[in-house]
Image (spheres, rainbow, N blue to C red):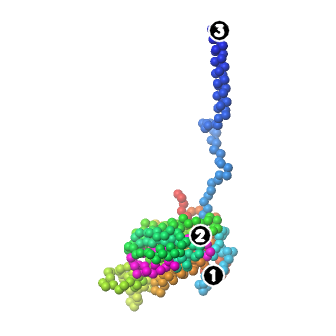
Amino acid sequence: MRNLKPAVASLLAAITLLFTMTNRVFAQAPAGPLPPRPGVAIQEPPKESGAAIKKEVRLVTTPVTVRDASGQMLHNVAQEEFRIFDNGTEQRITHFDLGGDPLSVVILLETSSRIEPMIPELRKTGILFTQQVMGPSGEAAVVTFNDTIEKRLEFSSDAAAIEKTIAEIKQGTSGTKLYDAMAAGVEMLTSRPEAPSGAGTRRRVLIVVSEAADKGSAAALGEVLRQAQLANVTIYSVGLSTTRAELQAEPRTTAPTIAPPGTYPLPPRPGTVPTPTSDPQYNGGNIDLLALAAWIVQHIQHEVKDHALEVAAAGTGGMHVRTFRDASIEKAIDEIGGELHAQYALSYTPTGSGEFGYHEIEVRVRRPNLSVRSRPGYYLASPE
């Protein structure tokens, strides 16, 4: 028994040393999650230095055309003379340009069999797009549509490639998925860079050369315009006429069927000849295109039966040019190019004008007797 006492004492000393070392190890280890005590708030983990929640900055750009009393475009209006309002609240202009910002253009061409006699004329328009529209620093993509939508050329600054692509377009089927094609063009333009500060902004332009008819599209016009407005896409349109296509076509050897494309199912009024400008079903009286554009953007589930291309142009600050009578496709494209390079571009970041819903844009110039054309507004949907 006497011999066991030293052994027991040594064992107790070893156990004491082991507990001491274990406590030191746990004291140096990082504290793990502890169960919360009642009445004590759980402490949030510390945020990294410099970390912040960033709010997306929305840039609104509107094209502005200013004309005098005689209809001539003015090119000498200074930035200080412009005032721009968003839902009635005046905004600070962050970017101002007169026809100098580089252009990103989607050229959207109808190739349906409905306009077969006009296809040769369309094939000659490539040089007009490259020289009159794009400018020295612009780029363009080419898309054709009928029953299907084909991206013929991605964005390119190569004038020869653009002209060759347009010169080689071929006639397609009789379908006209106009709205789906416009939606594809807007989506392509949305991918082009646009600086949030407004500096170095590329102007996004969709030029549609087509009839105003749509058949079979999944997209609705109001939906297309809503996306175009949010992406700052300006739509220009060249309205093709199936009536003119019929007149340009080779004489038929057989009698046409009742009410073929481009003809009228009802007889004309006595003593008149039906044309797209004189017949009530085409004329429709005076139409407030800006009001109609604002309405269709807010009610995208509804449809616009007539004047679709005119509404699209008015709703984005662009222009629609008809090609019936003596107006040619070449002349229409030349007119569009002339406006694009003599047009003001104003950008701002909306403040104090509300968050969601329809935003009305108003542009004023501090000069009398001038007419000002810009986009009427945009619709910002709630994420809910």
Q: Which residue is mark 2?
A: 202
- Rendering coords of residue 139 (x, y %): 55, 71
Residue situated in front as seen by the camera: 207 or 351: 207
Distance in Å between CA atoms under marks 3 and 1: 118 Å
Marks 3,1: beta carbons within 8 A: no
Is residue 253 shown left or right of residue 145? left
Vertical relation: 274 (above or below) 360: below
In the displayed structure, 11 sits above or below 87; it is above
Amino acid identity at mark 3: Arg
Instruction: Report, in whole angstroms, how far the alpha carbon at label 3 lies from the one at label 2.
Output: 99 Å
Residue 230 can be seen, yes or no: no
Task: Inspect the image, locate mark 2, and give the three-letter code of the amino acid beneath it.
Answer: Arg
| Residue at the extreme top | 1
Nearer to us: label 3 or label 2: 3
* Mark before the other along the chain sequence, 3 or 2: 3
Q: Are marks 1 and 2 in contact (CB under 8 Å)?
A: no
Is residue 126 visible in the rendered image? The answer is yes
- Residue on which the image places disc 3: 2
Magenta highlight range: 99-127
Q: CA distance from mark 1 to mark 2?
A: 22 Å
- Which quarter of the figure has residue 138? bottom right
Q: Residue at x 46, y 69 (%)?
A: 151
Q: Quadrant of the N terminus?
A: top right
Label disc, if present, on residue 74 of the rendered structure: 1
